[in-house]
Image (spheres, rainbow, N blue to C red):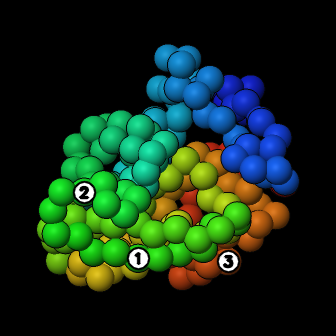
């Protein structure tokens, strides 16, 4: 399947100089959605994944579907102040600013094998923050799976030592 044709590219969003890769057309097409989830799940099979950790917000959509396909649990990494329980927190840099992620302190148990998922790998800051959340909880990072990777931003460099999989790659 030519998954690329289901990704819409929007220049100047969320701010000038950024090219936004919109996955909503892919999510709206049943065959494209199934293909993406199946390929991400194929990557995770054999890694003995107990939990998927998805980041707000688009990482929730595919991450939960991959967790279902694998028979694994799903945990969320959310923006500060969104979770109603004790949290752990990690701050990180974006390609256009800084942010933080929080996770319920009891979301990942020590020794659990966690697949980190997000829709996009750009500078690697968000992924690195999720790695820190998993490891602070005593979890083991089984791999990182992305729908899209923006190769010219070299986010993969921040993930050295971890196995990284991307379905689509784009130069920016």
Is mark 2 in CB contact (under 8 Å) with mark 1?
A: no
**Upstream in sequence: badge 2 or badge 1:** 2
Mark 1 highlights which residue? 90
**Residue at the spot 61% in from the left edge and 34% down from the top edge:** 23
Is mark 2 in CB contact (under 8 Å) with mark 3?
A: no
In front: 71, or 10?
10
Label 2 vs label 3, nearer the camera: 2
Q: Label 3: state its secondary structure.
A: helix
Image coordinates of residue 55 in percent, x first then y, are 43, 55
The image shows residue 61, relative to residue 172, as above or below, that is above
In front: 119, or 160?
119
Mark 3 highlights which residue? 157
**Residue at the spot 52% in from the left edge and 68% down from the top edge:** 99
Quarter where residue 78 is shown: bottom left
**Upstream in sequence: badge 2 or badge 3:** 2
**Residue at the spot 23% in from the left edge and 81% down from the top edge:** 138
Left or right: residue 73 compared with residue 147: left
Image coordinates of residue 44 in percent, x first then y, are 41, 53
The image shows residue 6, relative to residue 17, as above or below, that is above
Left or right: residue 69 compared with residue 98: left
- Res. 116 in view: yes
Q: Label 1: state its secondary structure.
A: strand
Left or right: residue 31 compared with residue 64: right
**Upstream in sequence: badge 1 or badge 3:** 1
Mark 2 highlights which residue? 83
Label 2 vs label 1, nearer the camera: 2
Count of marks placed on residues: 3
């Amino acid at each position: 399947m030519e998954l690329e044709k289901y990704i819409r590219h929007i220049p100047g969003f969320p701010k000038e100089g950024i090219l936004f890769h919109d996955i909503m057309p892919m999510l709206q097409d049943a065959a494209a959605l199934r293909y993406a989830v199946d390929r991400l799940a194929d990557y995770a099979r054999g890694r003995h994944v107990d939990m998927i950790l998805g980041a707000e917000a688009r990482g929730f959509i595919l991450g939960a579907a991959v967790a279902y396909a694998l028979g694994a649990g799903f945990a969320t990494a959310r923006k500060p102040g969104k979770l109603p329980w004790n949290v752990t927190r990690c701050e990180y840099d974006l390609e256009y600013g800084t942010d933080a992620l929080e996770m319920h302190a009891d979301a990942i148990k020590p020794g659990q094998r966690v697949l980190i998922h997000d829709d996009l790998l750009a500078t690697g800051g968000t992924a690195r923050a999720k790695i820190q959340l998993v490891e602070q909880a005593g979890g083991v990072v089984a791999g990182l799976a992305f729908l899209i990777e923006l190769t010219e931003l070299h986010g993969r460099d921040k993930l050295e030592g971890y196995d990284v999989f991307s379905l689509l790659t784009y130069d920016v």
